[in-house]
Image (tube, rainbow, N blue to C red):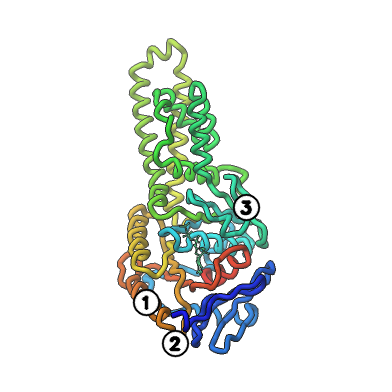
Amino acid sequence: MASSCVSSSFSPSLHYLTACRSSMTMVGLLSYAPKILKPISLTKSFSFISLSTARKPLRKSFQVRSVAAPAEAAAGFDDMVSGTQRKYYMLGGKGGVGKTSCAASLAVKFANSGHPTLVVSTDPAHSLSDSFAQDLTGGTIVPVEGPDSPLFALEINPEKAREEFRSASQSNGGTGIKDFMDGMGLGMLVDQLGELKLGELLDTPPPGLDEAIAISKVIQFLEAQEYSMFTRIVFDTAPTGHTLRLLSLPDFLDASIGKLLKLRQKIASATSAIKSVFGQEETRQDATDKLERLRERMVKVRELFRDTDSTEFVIVTIPTVMAISESSRLSASLKKENVPVKRLIVNQILPPSASDCKFCAMKRKDQMRSLDMIQNDPELSSLTLIQAPLVDVEIRGVPALRFMGDIIWK
Ligand SMILES: Nc1ncnc2c1ncn2[C@@H]1O[C@H](COP(=O)(O)OP(=O)(O)OP(=O)(O)O)[C@@H](O)[C@H]1O
């Protein structure tokens, strides 16, 4: 194997991937000078082609083969980019398949197309900073250097939130919890919990807190002035399980709030005479109104996740049996939740080659088998398939993301 492959080379201005010595066409990146990014087509003669001269032929070389005939083809990037009304894109899939790279490349492409864009990571193990090669940590919106239009990133920080939650819950009278939840836009929920003497239960973070924080951010996007400038919001979601919990949480909260409201009504009618004596009737009504408003917000979030005009969930996978099986289950769950899914990105496909070394030939066969699986999968075969090649270096930094975005989002 080693004898038939050329090992990677690297210099501050040039790097390219391990390539078969044969006629395999490889995709490379000439980068490291900001905004000077040149893909290389490595053929038998190892000729180098610049991005400006080779963009079109190069793109063609990525189209390995069409593996699925979409029943209802999703429109291309032109459609994704058109219009100034806000659109949300969520990218999700199995761990390590390239969700962050795809989400970040989409965000860069939107920003370079003139959309003020926000990319949000709801994955507790954030990698946006690594992907952009910039420090985007801190749990607040941070500008990303490089794109033509404003691009901001937000890594929702559940660890920090958990710490705040713990210390808040230890401060006196539970007001700390209220301040904390207020900060997340969920303060009125605590009013209710406090009154129902459930405050003690909040000593330890409840399951689903990560998702609750992410949802509260979505609520803020819907309402807050500070986010109103963004016309595209891209979510880099956590691996499958978390994502599904995130998507089903508004339903869960809506139902829970509904139960609280009913409970409150019962308590209210049973004790209304006493309460009116103590003059608390108005406060109670006020709290109920707040709870009702929170419920309405949750309904809005739920509707947003299911709104085909403003939201799309893009599944990212790689050509392996395990990743495709998980993508199929994810697609089924999303459909069950009525979340719009149209596109499937199959990332890290070996670029075409006239003849492979033994290792690459085996790998290619394996990948082709996996691609056939998609064609025969009832959940995935109807999605529009986007094939993205394995490139020779880690996708890091805005120039590399721009390069990747031009391949994927067409
Ligand atoms: N097409 C590609 N070619 C080469 N490397 C890639 C490609 N796509 C992603 N990578 C690399 O694979 C690694 C994982 O990618 P990424 O972080 O985007 O995956 P992820 O699905 O978000 O991972 P996690 O689930 O851990 O958040 C990164 O080092 C990234 O640069």
Cβ of mark 2 under 8 Å from ligand 1: the answer is: no
- Estimate how packed mark 1 is, as few (under 14), some (14 to 19) or many (20 or more) residues with alpha carbons within 10 Å: some
Measured as percent of width and height from the top left, residue 120 is found at: 54, 52
* 3D distance between C-alphas at marks 2 and 1: 15 Å
The amino acid sitting under disc 3 is: Asp
Mark 2 element type: loop
Mark 2 and mark 1 in contact? Answer it, CB < 8 Å.
no
Count of marks, rendered view: 3
- Residue topped by disc 1: 368
Residue 298, by quadrant, is top left
- SS label for mark 3: loop
Instruction: Give residue 96's position: percent from left, percent from top.
Output: 45, 60
Mark 2 — residue? 355
User: Which mark is first along the chain, 3 or 1?
Assistant: 3
Please tell me which residue is depicted at 49% across the width and 21% down the height of the picture: 173
Distance (Cα) linking label 1 and label 3:
38 Å
Residue 231's spot in the image, x, y percent? 58, 55
Q: Nearer the viewer, residue 229 or 145?
A: 145
Residue 203 image point, x, y percent = 43, 29
Indicate which disc, 3 or 2, sits on the residue closer to the N terminus.
Answer: 3
Nearest-to-viewer mark from 1 and 3: 3
Residue contact between numbered discs 3 and 2, judged by CB atoms under 8 Å: no
Which disc, if any, is residue 135?
A: 3
Note whether residue 167 is visible. Answer: yes
Q: Quadrant of the N terminus?
A: bottom left
Q: Amino acid at mark 1?
A: Met
Give left or right: position of 177 versus 51: left
Q: SS at mark 1?
A: helix
